[in-house]
Amino acid sequence: MDIVKKKKNSRLMSSKNVSIVIGLFLFVTLIFFAKSTLNKVSIAKKDLLFATVKQGDLDVTVEGYGKLTSDKLQLITTLTRATVQEIILKPGAAVSKESIIVKLANPELLQQVENAQQELSQVKANLRQLKVNQKRELLDEDSRLAELEARFESAKLRRTAEEKLVKDGIVSELTYKESLLNEKQLNKRIKILLQRMEQLSFVHQEGVNIQQERIKQQQGKLNVAQDRLNKLNVKAGFDGVLQRLSVKLGQSLAPGQEVALIGSVTELIALIRVPQSQAQLISVGQKAEVDTRQDKIIGKVVRIDPIVVDNTVEIEISLPPSLPRSARPQQNIDATITATTLKNVNYIERPANTKAQSNVELYKLNDEQTQASKISLKFGEKTGRFIVVRSGAQAGNQFIISDLSNYTNQQIAIN
């Protein structure tokens, strides 16, 4: 009986050991499954964004925002004190060179024009009077010259006649010499008178020139007054658009006060602002693409403002002469400037919340695109939608670029 009891206990111990082994196996399996479950999560494919690493040349771009503005601007100001009498055009109106924007009034200018006209008429009358007086003087001198020439001819004839008679003793030698002397004196007086008349003509001409200069000066005063009076009808000055009107009806204006701002319509430039941190990538001459929301225009960087405002820098972009109809002054725009081109680099669409020159962990897809494992990538330059991959991936690798920063799992399943 004792032997039978020992065999029964041995069987019980063997069954117990098997149960322990099975229990340990199940425990280990549960632990492995639990760890596997903690490091792996399942996400629907439709909820994820994917990108593939590409290799090739990549343009480094700088993006900015701003407005189109007129390349040609003209500020119109008042020349004299005036009152706004009538407003003809309002901001936004298309204008030509002769378009009247506002009409101003100044009674003093009208009086100045009338006074200048009267003074001009007076100096012109003085010139006419001067010419009459000069003509009278010349007539007097001509009359005197004619008289002297007549007397000279008479003296010449007398001397010729006495020259024959003196030889015959009919006329005394003294009388003949007196006649000869009289002839010489008259001839000399004629020469002096001719010289005087020549000088008188010069003096007369100078007098006329002086008076004409006075007329010219007075005409200039009249022109200035008339021009100021005419400019009370404020004109645009060139073809464009009325961008700003700075006056109101009945307003009193001081000299030099702004009336309006005229801008060109077809001659436009783009003024954009870019982040200060990216401004050093930009240089004059670089290509730029301006987006008007309807059309894209190719331009060129022509100026970089050295002043920083709100951590941004202003960039001026020149545009071609021929622009699409969607381009108009003061229109909001976006712009992309091509700073340089990186040759033969690996790049990928920029993942969410990714900065340039940073190390980031992304989920890389397997060949079947059923699982993704977290790996570390080193990024380089950022440009537009793309960022350069310095290390950690090769061309053709696929990654999840959705924001999965809340996931700490090393792997995820995709379904």
Image (cartoon, rainbow, N blue to C red):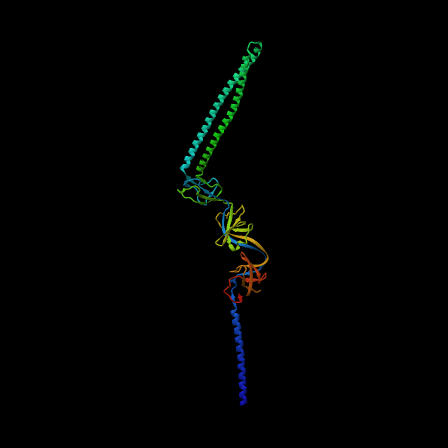
49 lies above or below 231: below
Q: Residue 180 placed where, x, y %?
A: 55, 15
Answer with the quarter of the image where residue 226 lies. Answer: top left
Considering depth in this image, is 268 or 11 the residue closer to the camera? 268
Q: Residue 10 placed where, x, y %?
A: 54, 85
335 lies above or below 76: below
Taking the spot 53% from the left edge, 79% from the top edge, the residue there is 20
Taking the spot 50% from the left edge, 21% from the top edge, the residue there is 141
Q: Residue furthest left?
A: 250
Q: Residue 145 placed where, x, y %?
A: 51, 20
Taking the spot 43% from the left edge, 31% from the top edge, the residue there is 119
Q: Residue 396 placed where, x, y %?
A: 58, 61
Q: How many marks?
A: 0
Taking the spot 54% from the left edge, 84% from the top edge, the residue there is 11
Q: Residue furthest right?
A: 344
- Left or right of residue 114, residue 323 in this image: right
Camera sees residue 333: no
- Left or right of residue 176, residue 256 in this image: left
Camera sees residue 140: yes
Q: Residue furthest bottom?
A: 1
Q: Residue furthest front?
A: 174
Considering depth in this image, is 297 or 360 the residue closer to the camera? 360
